[in-house]
Image (cartoon, rainbow, N blue to C red):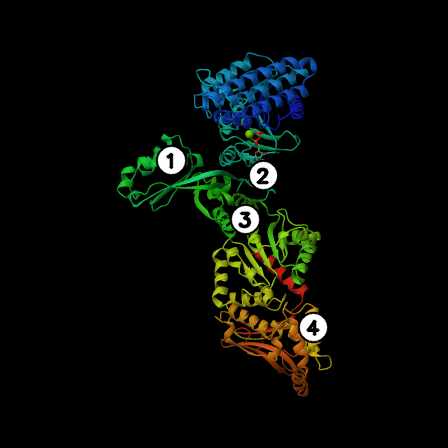
Amino acid sequence: MQVLKFGGSSVANGENINKVVDLVTQALTKDRTLIVVSALGGITDILIRAGVLAASGDESYKDKLQEVEQRHLATVKTLLPLTRQSSVLSLVKTRCNEIEDICNGVFLLGELSARTQDKIVSYGELLSSIIVAARFEAVGIANQWKDSRELISTDSRFGHAAVDFPRTNQQIRQFIDSSDTTLFIIPGFIAADTNGTTTTLGRGGSDYTAAIAAAAVDAQGLEIWTDVSGMMTADPRLVSNVKLIPHISYQEAMELSHFGAKVIYPPTIQPVMSKGIPVWIKNTFAPSDPGTVIEFSSTRNGGNGNNGGGNGSSIRGISSIGKIALLSLEGSGMVGIPGFSKRLFEALSGQAINVILITQGSSEHSICVGVDEINASAAKTAVDGAFSAEIGAGKVEPLIIETGLSIIALVGDQMKSHPGVSGKMFGALGRNGVNVRAIAQGSSERNISAVVAAGDVKKAINVLHEEFFETTYRQLNLFVTGTGNVGSRLLDQLWQQQHYLQEQLRIQVRVIGIANSRKMVFDNEGIDLWQWKEKLDDGQPMDLDEWVRGITSRNLRNTIFADVTANGDVASIYASLLQKSISVVACNKIACSSPYESYRRLKNLAREYNARFLFETNVGAGLPVISTLNDLLRSGDKVRRIEAVLSGTLNFVFNNYTGERPFADVVRQAQEEGYTEPDPRLDLSGTDVMRKIMILAREAGEKMEMADIENHSFMPAACMQGSVEDFYKEMGKEEEHFKQLCQAATAKGKKLKFVAQYDKGKASVGLQHIDPEQDLYHLYGKDNVVLFFTDRYSEQPLVIKGAGAGSEVTASGVFADIIRTAQS
Ligand code: ADP
Ligand code: ASP
Ligand code: MG
């Protein structure tokens, strides 16, 4: 004997029922078969809704019932030849009239008891199983249909009845033995109490019906046919890269389903496990997919328990339950007094409140339990009542209730022999800013559960799935602010490098949002980078608050905010992003050159919230200046002195200015070639260089402000007023001044360089005459050079030299920082 169960989607309509008939026909070639069917997909929900509407005096329950009738009539018409239709159609109509009569009663009374609800929903499975049986008859497969209410006996806990196994087993055996047919068909989910009143086994209970039947007849196997190709490493509706679990133990399957893996109803496992009956989970719509087998040991192929995700993970799957309330009982009166928790649990069980999770601190000051949110207020009344004396005496606080929570759980038999699972779990959650409210580990060590905010569930599950199952690649979710020279080069580079990143570095960068000063656009699946300009043009008007909301509300894992603007307002939002564990990559220098306290605060926030704050391109564009400095410090070196040419613009200008072409023209060329800041006066005045040397000094540990830096500016004051155009005009008038600067140097065989220095805690910037022996002399085009004199590099400095300006190299520096966040 074998038992096959077909879920709601498998029998949702005539077309699907035909697939079921094919599958069963195949199965019959192997063994006698009992099939259990659910209601047509969605019907149970509609029936419940109709009852609720009727009870609330809303006549639209009739529309719902109409819908129920139409679905069934249509199914009969597609499945049965005309000659066979009429008897089944009239049966469907009779049953539907009965439902309507009951609902009319509910409407008149304005009351819907659990008992009446069970009666109403029972029609879903009754109708579906009758229709399926008629279809088998129609294709010439004899079968015996039976009302499960005559087979499965329960108590009278309507909505969630408990099975009387001795009686049930006997009834089922008798039924099977009484017939020599090869195919039996019964409705799932429904049963009856000792008075013969209809009960149900809980939502999703058809799986349970099938397991009860399989155990009763000692079936050689139970097959659960559904709409997924087996049990997956996580809920496929929440995670896109789920993997099949080919084998899983009964305990693991039970644990996963208890914690929300809806693919199997949790009580289903118990009866089949007690008989050692293997359970297959198969896809009606892809029957040749291998599916999952649930049996005693999950380790049969390979023997190391690592066949879950096929990647050596010691966990088998991840699941979650929503709508959880956390109840905390706290107080000094609890310490050391036995019986406190007993009284708490008695108070809860007195109200039939199911406890899903328990944690107690070793200080015994508090005990915390997770329950279904709908039970929260009943729990509060019961517990506060039970502890009224202690609460009155101030020894215990009234029960604290938090709602809006969910539980996420990692499940695996092998967890106990693999230390470090919880460290990895909470590390990954922490890096992604998922705040964990409570933690519990079952004594079986088969499960670690954490209570998190409901809004964090999707992110948390994806983070954990990536951490434990996706050795293939890591996904970064990027938001790019700014599409000027650097921003657009960055987007192009990201596009060009997509495949390399995925194949070589196993990193997938998805650009979820792009914004500039005019427009912003989001795409949760990642913007197509080959047409980002068009997408952005079609976007909504830019609004910085909306942009930030769009980033934070998406709550994606591994989120990175890239600031490729030079805008102060954009820099002012870093703190709020870091506080949400969003990494910030900035080529914008404003934040790091703001007052020391705010620079420090951002660095601290990044550490506190496990995010990265990276700004390599603030100094020397794409040159690895800051990362090298950090590497030196991390390895214990100390920076004594820095000497540098840090302005690509000024270097370009002094390399190209010989006195022949006007100075203003050379500056304009630097701007046109994209080396200058958007406002070139920041470069010419030396301010940009001051910022850079200050950032280096700060990174080296110096608490430095802009006001602490000496600036020996070479620019006449008149040039620095008014607009950028005024600036060019004034520079034109000062040509003689620039000529003299140049000639004074060349007369001595020297070159002009705008040099930044940091020495003994002091910093200065200014034009210097450099002679050919100096490191700074041989510097061409827009190059930068940085000389680090450290404890280890005391005689000969560590020199970093190369192109220090330009959108291409700057973009690649930002790119490198983005990738660096993934490698933390
Ligand atoms: P049926 O109607 O066949 O009983 P259900 O809807 O009850 O089907 O269960 C199947 C659904 O369970 C899948 O469509 C899937 O969305 C969900 N599900 C949740 N967690 C998992 C998981 N770990 N593996 C597979 N499916 C899961
Ligand atoms: N039809 C019932 C439900 O939707 C039982 C089941 O499908 O398993 O809950
Ligand atoms: Mg189900």
Q: Nearer the viewer, residue 350 or 399?
A: 399
Q: Amino acid at mark 2?
A: Arg
- Cα–Cα span, label 1 and label 2: 32 Å
SS under mark 3: helix
Tell me, yes or no, if residue 688 can be seen here: yes
Element type at mark 4: helix
**Mark 1 / mark 2, whichever is N-terminal:** 2
Q: CA distance from mark 4 to mark 3?
A: 43 Å
State yes or no: Cβ of the residue under disc 4 lies below 8 Å from any atom of ligand 1: no
Where ligand 3 lies, by quadrant? Answer: top right
Q: Nearer the viewer, residue 580 or 284?
A: 580
Q: Position of residue 139 (x, y in %)?
A: 68, 17
Of labels 1 and 3, earlier in sequence is 1
Q: State the image quarter where residue 283 is shown.
A: top right
Q: Is residue 29 left or right of residue 430?
A: right
Q: Which residue is mark 2?
A: 237
Residue 668, which numbered label?
4
Task: Return the residue at label 1.
Answer: 379
Q: Is ligand 1 less than 8 Å from the beta carbon at label 2?
A: yes
Query: Where's residue 608, x and y in %?
Result: 47, 57
Quadrant (top left/top right/bottom left/bottom right) for the N terminus: top right
Q: Residues under labels 2 and 4: Cα distance? A: 56 Å
Q: Of marks 2 and 4, which one's residue comes earlier in the chain?
A: 2
User: What x and y, as percent, mark residue 23?
Assistant: 65, 24
Tag shown at residue 553: 3
> Which class describes the residues within 10 Å of circle 4: few (<14), some (14-19), or many (20+)?
some
